[in-house]
Image (cartoon, grey):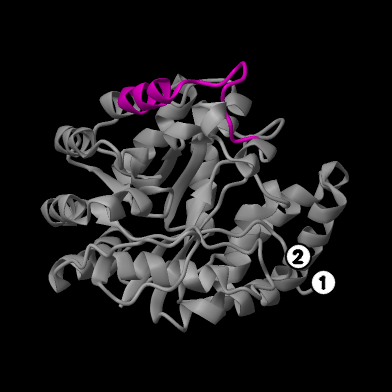
């Protein structure tokens, strides 16, 4: 069995279209649950992303867990209030994209800023699981090593206003100094795949921290020396969780990209045959069955619980009514998404 703890939607289709797309590969690979992670700072529907995820969660219940994301737009509510309302609506965990270089630049303040403290403290107190994306691959700060795709999508961080890679690591350390009991998973192996001693030092220093294994270049690195990586995975088997970053940006997956991504990510861990993916050259870590089961399923189950919370439609309708008062500020795309969400929850 498998739980995919890192799935996104960006609003590139109706809820039934998104569900049908996701089911193409989640059924193929026997995914027991997915955790839809909300990132209202990006995507087509931004502020509405939390609501759209709750709509899909309700449609697919009890298959979908949901990770709440903070809205950072003009006039946003304080972070603790947002979290409290999100949990009441039916979210199971928390997602932060605020520490990714481009969104951190947009945020304009450190992730250890005092405005976040009540939010982090509530996560600690409730024992919630926080998935945080901090930093990006090291090459992202060197334009000579950035691909044209990375440059075109604004993910080369050699311009003004971006933190350095080390400054991103320092900000996370400040958060964990203030909130040592956070159950935090750092996405994409925390971009430490080329420095396993440092990765081990971080996990040893922070006993409540974990690494999310959503692809971010690390499987290519591990394939160069799979035995060393294998020993790390065995030692820290309780601190690693499976994810894919699958999303709805390719609703017509004619080339099977996301299906092959699933096959690669799973095969790297449990030794299943790895399909052709990108440039190839992947060499499985072929982990012992008990280790693979922890990473693919058991660790996520411990973080999330047996079953997702049901969606609280009364609380969701309250949020819909609040947003409706500001509907003129939404983009045309957001207005269309809002109409779909309102029709589903309120029947009109």
The x, y position of residue 159, in whole percent, is 62, 20
Q: Is residue 11 left or right of residue 328?
A: left
Q: Which residues are magenta?
A: 154-174
* Nearer to me, 222 or 206: 222
Q: Nearer the viewer, residue 29 or 122?
A: 29
In the image, 272 versus 54, the foreground residue is: 272
Q: Secondary structure at mark 2?
A: helix
Tell me if residue 16 comes above or below residue 172 in the rendering: below
Quadrant of residue 148 within the rendered picture: top right
Which residue is identified by label 2?
342
- Tell me the quarter of the image containing the C terminus: bottom right
Quadrant placement of the N terminus: bottom left
Q: Does the stretch in magenta take in 164?
A: yes
Nearest the camera: 254 or 164? 254
Is 55 rendered above or below residue 152? below
Q: Residue at x 22, y 42 (%)?
A: 208
Closer to the N terminus: mark 2 or mark 1?
2
Residue 286 position (above or below residue 48): below
Q: Which residue, given by chain and number where applicable, does mark 1 sit on? A: 348
Q: Residue furthest top?
A: 160
Q: Are marks 2 and 1 in contact (CB under 8 Å)?
A: yes
Report x, y in % for residue 293: 21, 70
| Magenta segment includes 23 | no
Q: Residue at x 57, y 22 (%)?
A: 158
In this rendering, position of residue 103 left or right of residue 91: right
Q: Callout 1: 10 Å neighbours few (<14), some, many (20+)? A: few
Q: Secondary structure at mark 1?
A: loop
- Residue 115 seen in render: yes
Q: From where the camera sits, is residue 314 visible?
A: no
Residue 187 placement (x, y as % from top left)? 39, 46
Please give the name of the residue rendered at 72% of the width and 31% of the height, measured from the top-left corner: 74
């Amino acid at each position: 069995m498998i739980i995919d703890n890192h799935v996104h939607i960006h609003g590139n289709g109706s809820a039934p279209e998104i569900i049908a797309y996701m089911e193409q590969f989640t059924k193929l690979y026997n995914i027991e649950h997915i955790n839809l992670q909300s990132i209202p700072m990006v995507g087509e529907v931004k502020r509405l992303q939390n609501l759209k995820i709750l709509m899909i969660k309700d449609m697919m219940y009890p298959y979908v867990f949901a990770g709440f994301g903070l809205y950072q737009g003009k006039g946003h509510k304080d972070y603790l209030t947002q979290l409290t309302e999100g949990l009441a609506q039916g979210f199971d965990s928390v997602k932060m994209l605020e520490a990714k270089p481009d969104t951190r630049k947009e945020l304009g303040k450190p992730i250890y800023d005092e405005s976040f403290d009540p939010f982090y403290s509530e996560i600690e107190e409730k024992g919630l699981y926080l998935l945080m994306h901090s930093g990006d691959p090291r090459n992202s700060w060197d334009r000579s090593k950035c691909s044209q795709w990375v440059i075109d999508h604004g993910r080369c961080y050699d311009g003004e206003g971006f933190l350095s890679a080390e400054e991103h690591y320092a900000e996370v350390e400040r958060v964990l100094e203030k909130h040592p009991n956070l159950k935090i998973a750092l996405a994409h192996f925390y971009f430490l795949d080329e420095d396993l001693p440092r990765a081990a030092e971080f996990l040893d220093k922070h006993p409540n921290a974990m690494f999310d294994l959503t692809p971010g270049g690390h499987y290519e690195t591990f394939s160069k020396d799979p035995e060393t990586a294998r020993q790390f995975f065995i030692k820290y088997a309780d601190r690693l969780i499976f994810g894919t970053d699958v999303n709805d940006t390719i609703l017509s997956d004619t080339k099977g990209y996301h299906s092959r991504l699933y096959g690669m990510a799973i095969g790297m861990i449990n030794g299943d045959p790895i399909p052709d993916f990108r440039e190839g050259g992947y060499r499985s870590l072929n982990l012992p069955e008990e280790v693979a089961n922890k990473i693919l399923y058991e660790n996520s189950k411990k973080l999330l619980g047996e079953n997702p919370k049901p969606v609280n439609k009364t609380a969701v309708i309250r949020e819909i009514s609040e947003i409706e008062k500001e509907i003129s500020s939404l983009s045309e795309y957001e207005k269309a998404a809002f109409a779909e969400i309102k029709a589903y929850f309120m029947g009109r």
